[in-house]
Amino acid sequence: MAAKAKARALVASIGQKPKISRGLLAGSLIKCTDNSGAKVLRIIQVAAYKGRLRRVPAASVGDMVFASVRRGTPDVRKKIFRAVIVRQKKLYRRPEGFWVQFEDNAAVIMTPEGEMRGSEIRGPVAREAAERWPRIASASSIII
């Protein structure tokens, strides 16, 4: 049993994204946790998602999604942006064996080049998102 866990940790450390329970479907409303002016986002599509007929695209922590701004300042409302998921309510398991769950679903708006649109992040950020996106790691105050 311990050998399997070590093998999974080894695969995750090589550079592949570890398997995380996908808790956010297309159409989900999520909180925007940066200071870009957006308050609520709706997930439209998951970037680089290869799906199957009639399967709804789903995202997890660290995934980039396309989202429309539902509530926020007038200059960002009704526009489509790229966003990275930084927190999810759905439980997911880390390779060390810990289970992680946040109290809300949240994302950070990004530019197509991978830079953050805002300058600060409110609240904690999942370690998986911080490891995958260095700009998010540098702007976040709490990494869990």
Image: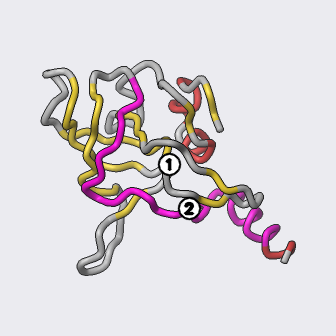
Tell me which segment is drawn in magenta.
5-34
Residue drawn 19% across and 37% down?
70
- In what quadrant of the picture does the N terminus appear? bottom right
> Callout 1: helix, strand or loop?
loop
Residue drawn 60% across and 47% down?
128
Q: Residue 59's image quarter?
A: bottom left
Q: Nearer the viewer, residue 61 or 91?
A: 91
> Callout 2: helix, strand or loop?
loop
Question: Compared with residue 27, is residue 31 higher up or lower down, i.e. above or below?
Answer: above
Q: Nearer the viewer, mark 2 or mark 1?
A: 2
Image coords of residue 2 (percent x, y): 86, 72
Image coords of residue 108 (percent x, y): 40, 35
Image coords of residue 68 (percent x, y): 21, 42
Task: Report the residue marked by disc 1.
Answer: 62
Residue drawn 33% across and 73% down?
51
Instruction: Check whether the beta carbons of the residues at disc 2 and disc 1 lie within 8 A of each other.
Output: yes
Is residue 72 found left or right of 15 in the rendered image?
Answer: left
Question: Residue 41 magenta-drawn?
Answer: no
- Name which residue type carries label 1: Gly
Report how far apart the C-alphas of labels 2 and 1 lie in the structure.
9 Å
The disc at residue 20 is 2
- Name which residue type carries label 2: Ile
Residue drawn 56% across and 61% down?
20
Residue sitting at the far right: 2
Is residue 88 found left or right of 72 in the rendered image?
Answer: right
Image coords of residue 28 (percent x, y): 30, 52
Q: Nearer the viewer, residue 48 or 104?
A: 104
Residue sitting at the far front: 103
Q: Could you classify mark 2 by the number of other residues whose Cα lies within 10 Å: few (under 14), some (14-19), or many (20 or more)?
A: some
Is residue 110 found left or right of 20 in the rendered image?
Answer: left
- In what quadrant of the picture does the C terminus appear? top right
Which badge, 2 or 1, is on the more N-terminal residue?
2
